[in-house]
Amino acid sequence: MDSVRSADGTVLSVHTSGHGPALLLVHGTSADHTRWSGVAPELEKRFSVFYMDRRGRGDSGDGPSYHVMREAEDVASVVEAIGQPVRILGHSYGALCAMEAALLTDEIARMVLYEPPIPTGVTMYADGVPDRMQGLLDAGEPERALEVFFREVVRMPEEELDAYRRLPMWQQRIKLAPTIPREMAIDRTYVFEPEKFAGLDIPVGLYLGGDSPELFRSAVATAEAALPNATIVVLPGQQHVAMDTDPDLFLREVFRFLLDG
């Protein structure tokens, strides 16, 4: 599978590798399918892995207007195109897209959702952060805008950010920084409706870093209350990117949940 056409006609790039049951990976903000490169070899030993580029990133196209529900439709379109029951691993914003997609298709077998940024009333960022980031982007300084995002929105500790800058994916994240502001608007453009999920009985693992800030703790608790068959899995000593900071722990927990059934 090289590409899938979504409900609104947007062409989505999907890279495939590995052997085993189908696993769709849905990346988060400021990323594309390459963000999984550190854990990809181990995942491909257990699964047929489908790496999608979310719209506006990598080799995927983009639509004339943006809303998170278009991304949910994207995920559902890829799931339907795979043609068999699919496990999903969604990270951050991609986890929210996957959660909404589960209401659009019956072909999802189980999901791991790692810190979906559900708006819960907890302040996501200080006043002026989006404008400051957009100003940096307009001034041709995408790396500085990206640093603001990780420091002031993700709340990544400085030592973790220093390590992150040294990863090969950092340069790709700089290129994708212009896609961040439209996702940061989620607290104004998206309303979480827990009642919609009352009949969604597929197993869902809600993964949470043990050291993650209240923003993500509140979001995961909200998701657990809405999902009938959800389990919170805490990753000790981790925050938002355990696949990078402790890949062995991350993979162990992912395998335990996604291969259990």
Image (cartoon, grey):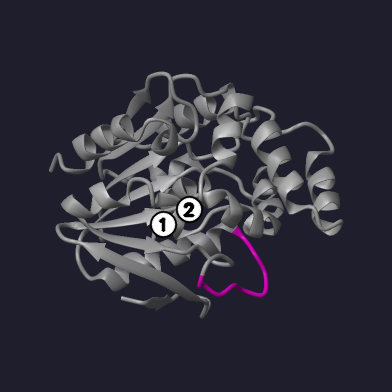
Whole-Å distance between the Cαs marked 2 and 1? 6 Å
The magenta-colored residue range is 59-67
- Residue 106 appears in the rendering: no
Q: Is residue 200 left or right of residue 156?
A: left
Task: Determine the residue positioned at 46% across, 65% down.
Answer: 73
Give the quarter of the image for residue 160: top right
Badge 1, how many Cα within 10 Å: few under 14, some, many 20+? Answer: many
Magenta highlight on residue 243: no
Does residue 234 sit above or below 125 in this rendering?
above
Numbered label attached to residue 101: 1
Q: Position of residue 218 (x, y in %)?
A: 53, 26
Which residue is nearer to you in this view: 25 or 76? 25
| Residue holding disc 2 | 97
Q: Which mark is residue 73?
A: none
What element does badge 1 sit on?
Answer: helix
Viewer-proximal residue among 138 and 214 = 138
Horizontal side of 145 relative to 95 (left or right) equals: right
> Is residue 14 shown above or below 222?
below
Q: Residue at x 57, y 49 (%)?
A: 170
Q: Which amino acid type is shown beneath numbered disc 1?
A: Ala
Contact between marks 2 and 1 (CB within 8 A): the answer is yes
Magenta region's main secondary structure? loop
Give how far across and how far down residue 250 sits, in percent.
33, 34
On the rendered structure, is 85 left or right of 161? Answer: left
Residue 89: image location, x then y, percent: 35, 48
Residue 158 versus residue 48: which sits nearer the camera?
Answer: 158
